[in-house]
Amino acid sequence: MADLIIIAYDNLATAQAARAKLIELQGRYLIELGDAVVAEREADGKVKLHQPVNLTAVGAASGGMWGALIGLLFLNPLLGAAVGAGAGALSGKFTDLGINDQFMKDTAAALPAGSAALCILVRKVTADKVVPEMAHFGGKVLQTSLTKEQEEQLDAALKHG
């Protein structure tokens, strides 16, 4: 079972640095992430999500490849690639993996303008090694699916990091 953790930061740069650190820790097999999105509340109050993967671009590339292959069967690979890329991009745009986008936008809307939140879905974690690494970034725990005790320990570690 995965755990949802949302941590607020004073600015976008800190939230993005914290996400980069999590990705590095994942490369060292200390954490397994299901999703890691930075939700920014811009100065004008609008909320922008910074996804780690652009699903529209991935869909377009995949659709273009499959469209070209199908187009070869009908002796028109360029038309097949164009149609496939369009269909793939449309599919990627409406695909939502991991944390629900609307949930993240609603959560970030409560943040002060100019701040950001790191929304992560954690599948597995070696907490005694990951938490000290993340404590350097500070932040405030906004919401989790952790137990009350785990949430309090995480919040305390972030405050004293």
Image (tube, rainbow, N blue to C red):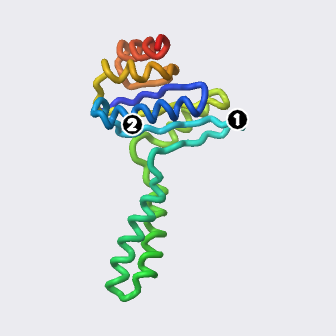
The N terminus, quarter of image: top left
Q: Which residue is mark 2?
A: 23
Q: Secondary structure at mark 1?
A: loop
In the rendered image, residue 34, in percent from the top left (x then y), is placed at 35, 39
In the rendered image, residue 75, in percent from the top left (x then y), is placed at 37, 88
In the rendered image, residue 136, in percent from the top left (x then y), is placed at 47, 20
First reached walking from the N terminus: tag 1 or tag 2: 2
Vertical side of 5 occupied by 46: above or below: below
Residue 89: image tag: none
Vertical side of 140 occupied by 6: above or below: below
Q: Amino acid at mark 1?
A: Ala
Locate residue 59: give its quadrant: bottom left
Q: Which residue is mark 1?
A: 43
Please report the residue visible at 53 percent of the width from the left and 43 percent of the height from the top.
50
Q: Mark 1, mark 2: which one is toward the viewer?
A: 2
Please report the residue visible at 40 percent of the width from the left and 39 percent of the height from the top.
35
Locate residue 147: give its quadrant: top left
**What count of labels does the image hold?**
2
Vertical side of 69 occupied by 150: above or below: above
Q: Are marks 1 and 2 in contact (CB under 8 Å)?
A: no
* 145, 26: nearer the viewer: 26
Vertical side of 128 occupied by 29: above or below: below
Please report the residue visible at 33 percent of the width from the left and 77 percent of the height from the top.
69
